[in-house]
Image (spheres, grey):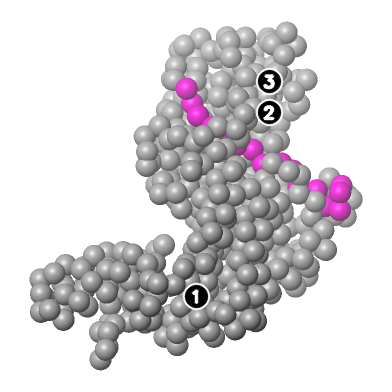
Amino acid sequence: MALSIYNTLTRRLEEFAPIQAPQVGLYTCGPTVYDFAHIGNFRAYIFEDLLRRTLRLQGFRVTQVMNLTDVDDKTIRGSQAAGVQLDDFTRQYKEAFFEDLRTLAIEPAEHYPAATAHIAEMIALIAKLLAKGYAYHSEDGSIYFSIAKFKPYGQLAHLDRDGLRSGARIAQDEYQKENASDFALWKAWQAADGATAWESPWGRGRPGWHIECSAMSMKYLGKSFELHTGGVDNIFPHHENEIAQSEAATGKPFVKYWLHCAHLVVDGRKMAKSAGNFFTLRDLLQRGYTGREIRYALLSVHYRQVLNFTFEALAAARGALKRLDEFAEKMQNQSPPAAAGREFQPVNAELQSKIENWVAGHVAAFTRALEDDLNTSLALAALFDLVYEGNKRLAAGALTPAQAHQALQALAQIDRVLDVQPGITPLPPQTIIDLAQARLEARRRKDFAAADRLRRQVEAQGWIIQDTAEDFKLKRSGAASS
Ligand SMILES: [Zn+2]
């Protein structure tokens, strides 16, 4: 079955088809590094991690780009309030952000371009928009995008074209739909910007926020690419403006699928410092919760539903993980001895092939749930069905060591997406066991050329064969990734 995802652009579920499989370009709007990221931000980053891992599980080769907004209205205000240079101010929050990603087991993107390192690309893009007549100079030396010139403006946010205030201008980076109007591509220097300014063909100034993502996404992913994501509050104006800038400049469709995750609220209310319900990741760690508990809580609700974050939900995540850990431990105790460590020794291969693989249905249900627009609540239900059935079989004395081994393999495979059981032993997939078995047989009939070839095949997939007196052991090689 294919992956189906909800495209904000068409307001429909669509089957995912890359422009040129197996390559997939994924642009994820990143943090504005003026403060520690809060759990609402991390809900979006975890949704994007889930998307990325699901794509990889399906055999796609993902190139993910996440920008770091290190110059905008907020970072400039913050650095001035702190009395430090802009780059010194943003550096501490960049470092904190990467530390937080590791705490939450979010896979690193391939590129993390910083806005301040791509001013030249933004200037080139603005110059193109001026040359094509989509942009104009304002009296103060700033440059604006004319939304009246770009006919499809409003397609993503589904704006009523009659309500657009073309000709009216807005200088701020963030504004509401009712203020849809010409927006700033380049902001002429003002006293409030202090030392933050770059030279451009139009004088000193700085880029607007929206142009940053158009310039950096196209630099790393090309003029047209597959996926662009963010929170629902990015739909307007940020992503609407990105489409306008990019498509006006290139004349090509910018992004095929736009995915947006819903808000996170705390105890049913909008998270706000003034309401006392505002949490960074660090606040929760200080209260004794772990990264994987928070990750589980943020993963457990479908990304298009509002996530109501509560401490009861965190306690439930802790309980669910405890159940998973206990199940994994029981399966390890029941497995053939060598499979309990980081090594694998085949149980009589002939016998194993005769046992019905009881986990396959659960793994398939888990995968189907993810393919259904990343339905994590259904996927977790499939995982706990596996736990329930395994426990039931074990209690009835009806779980063989080979079947316990299959359960561990299923957990390890599921955890490639969820990544909430770091202790789970990576066990070799059946294809690797089969290759190692074939090599053993080749050795026994003294066909050493075939045995060597099979060994190299196993090694190319990240496993090492160690010969033992009777058969062999399999070990994960250190450098290989999943
Ligand atoms: Zn962006």
Q: Position of residue 385 (x, y in %)?
A: 64, 64
Please name the amino acid that badge 1 sits on.
Gln
Quick one: label 3, few (<14), some, or many (20+) residues within 10 Å? some
| Pick the front one: 345 or 343 | 345
Q: Position of residue 116 (x, y in %)?
A: 52, 41
Q: Position of residue 475 (x, y in %)?
A: 35, 77
Quick one: label 2, few (<14), some, or many (20+) residues within 10 Å? many
Q: Position of residue 66 (x, y in %)?
A: 52, 45
Q: Where is mark 3, residue-wise?
A: 158
Judged by its main secondary structure, the magenta piece is strand
Q: Tell me which corner region of the image, top left, top right, bottom left or bottom right, holds residue 189.
A: top right
Q: Tell me which corner region of the image, top left, top right, bottom left or bottom right, holds residue 242.
A: top right
Residue in the image at 37% along x and 38% along y: 21
Q: Single out the mark in the foreground, 3 or 1.
A: 1
Residue in the image at 43% along x and 40% along y: 24
Q: Secondary structure at mark 1?
A: helix
472 above or below 122?
below
The region drawn magenta spans 253-269
Q: Single out the mark in the foreground, 2 or 1.
A: 1
Residue in the image at 23% along x and 65% along y: 457
Residue in the image at 27% along x and 84% along y: 471
Q: Secondary structure at mark 3?
A: loop
| Pick the front one: 117 or 147 | 147
